Every structure is written in C-alpha cells, then in structure tokens.
Amino acid sequence: MREKIDSIKHIILIYYLVIAIIVGSFYAFAPLDASMDQTITIILGLFLLLFPVLMFYTMNYALHVFLFTFAFIAGFYGFYHHSVDDHSISNALYFTFRLYLLDLADVFTQDGSSPVRYPLLLDIARWTAASYTISTIFIAMYRTLEKEITLFMAQTFGNHHVIFSYNEKSHLLIHDLVQQKERVIVVDEQFSPERQNMLEDMKVIVIQSSIKDDNIFQTLGVKRAKSLALFHPNDRESLYVLMHLDQYIRRKKINTQVKKVIIQIENERYLEELTSFLARVEHFAFPVEIMNVYEEVARRFWEQHERILKSKEVLHFLIVGYESLGRQLALATQKRNHVPPLEMTIVDRFPSYERRGSIEKIPFDIEVDSLKELIAEREDKFSHIFICLDEDYVDLMEGIELSEIFPTTPIYMNFTDESIEQTFMIATTKTKKTLYSIGTIQEVLTKEYLGL
C-alpha cells in the first residue's frame, strides 16, 4: 500500500492543486445563486476531498468516474430541488441522464421555455456531463483506431522493433523492450484473446497474419524498423522469413534502416549450417545475428565463471539433463581448453550407455529413477554439478537432495523464471552457500544484451 501511495502521490497533489484553483475561480468570478446551498456545497466538497481514494484502485478510468459522478450528483440535486414543479425522484433521475445525451430538460420555467440563465448548479452539471460524453466518444474512437494510428506512425517514422512469432522467449524480449520505452510490433498467425489484450495493454502493436503473406513486410514497416527478431518455434519458419525478407528488400530495392536481424535457432544442424553460410558468403541485405538462447546462457555463465576452467585442479562435471541448456553447457565447456582434460558425466534419457573419450552418457529418467541412488552407486567424486531439467521446482528439489550427498560441491541449477531464482537466492542467503543459479534466459533476451 505504501508503494502505491508513493507512486501516485504526485498525481494526488496535482489533483488537489487543480481543484483548489477551479473552486477559487468559481467563488471569485461566478455569481453564486440559491442553487448552491449549504447542503450541496458540503456534498460536493466531500466528494472532491475524498475522490483521490478511487485513484488507488484505478488510474485509467479516474477522470471518467470523476466527471460522471460529479455531473450525476449536481444534476440530480439540481433537478430534484430547483425545478419549477415538484418532480419525483424518477423524473429527476431521467432528467439527469438526459444530460449525458447533451440534452437539458427545461423544467425551470412555467411554460417550459429556455430561461435566460440556468441555476449555477445545473450549469456546472450540464458542462461536466457534456465533458464526460465528449471525452468518452473521443477515447472510444481513439481506442478503435489506436492500432491503425500507431501502426501508421511506425510505418511513417520507423525506429521500431518487429518480433516474428509470440512465445515464451519472444515475450521476454518484448517485455524488456517495452520497459525501455521502445515501440514494438509482434506478428503471429494466431493470438488468444487473453494474450492479445495483455500485449495491447503493454502498448504493443499486435498483427495477426500469416508470415507468408506477401504484404506483411510492408504492413510492418520493416523499411524503417530498427531491428527484427525471428523467434518461431519451428526453425524452418524463421529461416523462411529470413530468406523472404531478403528477397523483398532486394526486389523492391529498399534502402532499409534495419540495424540488426536476430534469428533464434533451436536445431543444432540449422545453427551450424546457417553460421557456416554467413561466414563464407555475404548474402543478406542486412546484418544477421544467429543465436540460441541456451547457448547464450551457457556462454554468459562461463564468462562469469572463467576461474573454474582456468584452475589447475582436476575437474569432473556432472550434468543432469541434456536437453537445451545441458547440451549447450557441455558444448561450451568442450570449446574451452583445460589442463588437465576435464571429465563430464551426463545423465538423461539416452537410449543406451555411451562413453567417448572423457564424456560419459548414462541413461536416466527423472520421473522413474532416483538421481540420489544412481550417484551413490557409482561413488564418483564430482567437482561441480549442473542440474538442467525442465522444471524449476524439480531442479531445486534435486539440488537440495544432492547437496546432502555433496555438502561442499558447488551445485548449479537452471531457472527459467527470474522470480523463482530471486526467491531461491533470498532463501539461501543465511545458509552455507553450495547451491547456485546458472542464470535465466531472461538475462540474455534484453535490449542491452542483444545490442538492439
């Protein structure tokens, strides 16, 4: 609650300052009449005084609620007490709602004609109601056309980022770019209503279209885009977009402003082939950077823990889980020379036992087998343990269990969620530190890290 107060206290101060100026101006320049009696003055005063409480619950609709409620209070009181005839509550309510339709019921003269001057309270009510109605219409029109307006601005002035395919990985990059006040367009073939609303609330332009649409690049304004990121789960689709984009730029003879095109590749074969192709041939009409998020996490980890591989001690790594990050950690380790040569024991759902040189692969199913029993049977001494399973909770549980067997061995775990990692770090600050985090993909999917 305290954080909420701190975040909006400047808005509340501005609100009270503006209200004080408006009220002071009315008392100084507007001729007060009998309609502004003591009762309504107290009611409106309390409303103005207590209204900021609503700001703690909603800021987006605070102005609308203010205008609607103020007009309703003033209008209902005015019609009920200051009409020529004694009207019922029902009539007073009906007359009040007519104000929002920009129609004032003339019930202040005997013959129903418009008076020279309306009671001040009704003047205030009708202008407040008109302000509410007109502002609502304009906001509704803007929200209806907001996507088209924002997209037109991006196409015209550029300096935006285009993300192809929406998924867990691309969401992390989108979130960071939005946090950095960057304009983002995300395109995919299908969005659920919940995801589309969430992205639009983040001020992200959502384009639902086939990536094979011939007009998609023109619609996205890639000519003036700052960067493009291809995050399709199917590597072939990302490669298709990359090739199609190059053909589009060359065919249209576009002098593009794109500073970087990032393509996220999961399959190692595609990654090696595309990397080799870019190394041998300068083909694309724009700078291309190939990445695998787990490779980046592994590279970042070894850059921060270079001292481990530079040490002269005998190293024997245990890697639990060979999917995605586990594989990349092993590959990144092999690329770094260590004397004496280090050994790696890898356990995962391998079809059979295999040993090649200093690398040993052991069949293991975390859902069936016990990691603790497997290690106890082998009686190996590991210098470092890396747990790279699919779920953060499983990683943490296995890490805690292994720390009982190896109380002095550093154990590194893979966390996909930064909030879980932070909770883990807090929980282990007062205990003997043998459990560590390898890092998260969120740390490598940022504007700063990717150089966008």
Image (cartoon, grey):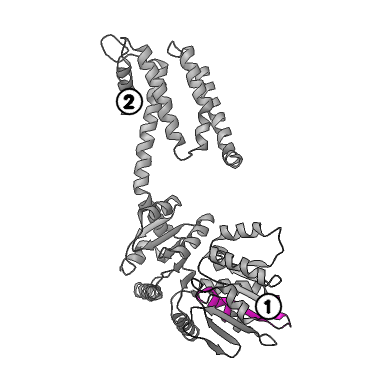
The kind of residue on which mark 1 rests is: Ser
Amino acid of disc 2:
Phe
Q: Please check the rendered image and state whether residue 323 is part of the magenta-colored stretch, yes or no.
A: yes
Q: Mark 1 points at which residue?
A: 383
Q: Residues within 10 Å of mark 2 (few under 14, many from 20)?
A: some
In this view, which residue lies farthest toward the left?
111
Q: How far apart are marks 1 and 2 (CA)?
A: 77 Å
Give the label, 1 or 2, closer to the camera: 1
Tell me the number on the disc at residue 97: 2
The stretch of residues the image draws in magenta is 307-330
Looking at this view, name the residue that lies furthest to the bottom: 357
Decide if residue 375 is on the left or right side of residue 92: right
Residue 191 image point, x, y percent:
36, 58
Q: Can residue 329 be seen in this view?
A: yes
* Mark 1 or mark 2, earlier in chain: 2
Q: Name the spot of residue 19 as percent of width and height, x first.
A: 53, 27
Q: Percent x, y for residue 381?
A: 67, 80
Q: In which quarter of the image is residue 104?
A: top left
Is residue 184 in the magenta section?
no
Instruction: Pick the residue in front: 319 or 21.
Output: 319
Q: Which of 410 and 374 is in front in this view?
A: 374
Q: x, y percentage for residue 4?
A: 57, 41
Which label number is shown at residue 57? none
Helix, strand or loop at mark 2: helix
Q: Nearer the viewer, residue 186 or 368?
A: 368
- Residue 31 in view (yes/no): no
Asked whether disc 1 touches disc 2, contact meaning CB atoms under 8 Å apart, the reply is: no
Horizontal relation, residue 194 to residue 348: left or right: left
Label 1: which secondary element:
loop
